[in-house]
Amino acid sequence: MGSKNKLKRFIENKSFSNVIQPNREELISNQFNLKGNWNNLYFRNNNPIVVELGCGKGEYTVNLAKLNPSVNYIGIDIKGARFWRGAKTANEENLDNVVFLRTQIELINYVFGNDEVSEIWLTFPDPQIKYQRRKHRLTNPIFLEIYKNILKSDGIVHLKTDSEFLHGYTLGLLEGLSITPLLSNHNVYSNLNAPDEVLNIKTHYEKLFSELDKNISYLSFNFNDD
C-alpha cells in the first residue's frame, strides 16, 4: 500500500464514528473513559461484548457483527490503515454493533475493565515461532493472564489459526494450567461440531491458506478450570 493511500485512510478513519484511537499516555494513565463503560457510554445497551485482537482488515469482526446483531463487537489492531476497510464496510452497512480501536494488544488491560468482555477471538495471529519472539505470541502466559482479567468468569477465548505450532503451543500452556479446552480441532472443516462462526467466516488470508491445502485449526477455552 502506498503512503498516499495510507494517509488517505488515516484521515478517513478520523471521520468515522466507529473508530476510536486513544493515545498510549491516555491509556496507561487511566484516562480512557470507556474502560469499564463500553456498554453504558458507547453501545448504550447491555449486550455481550466480544473482542477480536489483531483484527487486520476487520473481516472477521464485521461478519461476526452481521451474524449476531444482539452482540457488541470490538476489533482491535495497531494498524489503522488495515482496519479502515472493516470500519468503512460497517458504516456503509449501518452496523451499529461494531467498533474498531487502534491500539497495541498488550495495552488492552487499560482498555477494558475486569469481567467486561464475554469472548475474545484470535484469528490467524502471527505464531511468532522464533524463541526470542515468544513474548509476542498472543497466547503466551502474560496475555492469558490479561485475558483472564478482562473476561467474565465464563468468558471464552477462541483461537483460529493455520499454525500447527501455535495450536500445539497453546494446548501445552493450557495443560500446564490444568485447563481443559472446550473444543480443539486440527482441521475444522472435517469436524461438523465446529461453531458456525468458525465455519462460515473466511478471511482473505484463510482462503489463501486453504488454497495451499493448509489445515485450519480451532481451539476454544475458558479459565473456569484453574
Image (cartoon, rainbow, N blue to C red):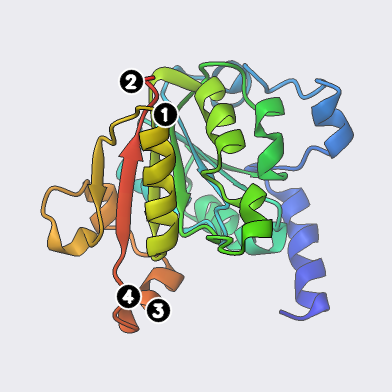
Element at badge 4?
loop
Q: Which mark is residue 28?
A: none
Q: Is 28 left or right of 46, judged from the image as shown?
A: right
Q: Are marks 4 and 3 in contact (CB under 8 Å)?
A: no
Q: Are marks 2 and 4 in contact (CB under 8 Å)?
A: no
Residue under numbered circle 3: 208
Ranked by sequence position, the earlier of labels 1 and 4 is 1
Residue under numbered circle 4: 214
- The amino acid pointed to by label 4 is Lys
- Residues under labels 2 and 3: Cα distance? 36 Å
- The amino acid pointed to by label 3 is Leu
- The amino acid pointed to by label 1 is Leu
Disc number lying in front (2 or 4)? 2
Residues 221 and 195: in front is: 221
Ranked by sequence position, the earlier of labels 4 and 3 is 3
Q: Is 88 left or right of 14, judged from the image as shown?
A: left
Residue under numbered circle 1: 177
Residue under numbered circle 2: 225
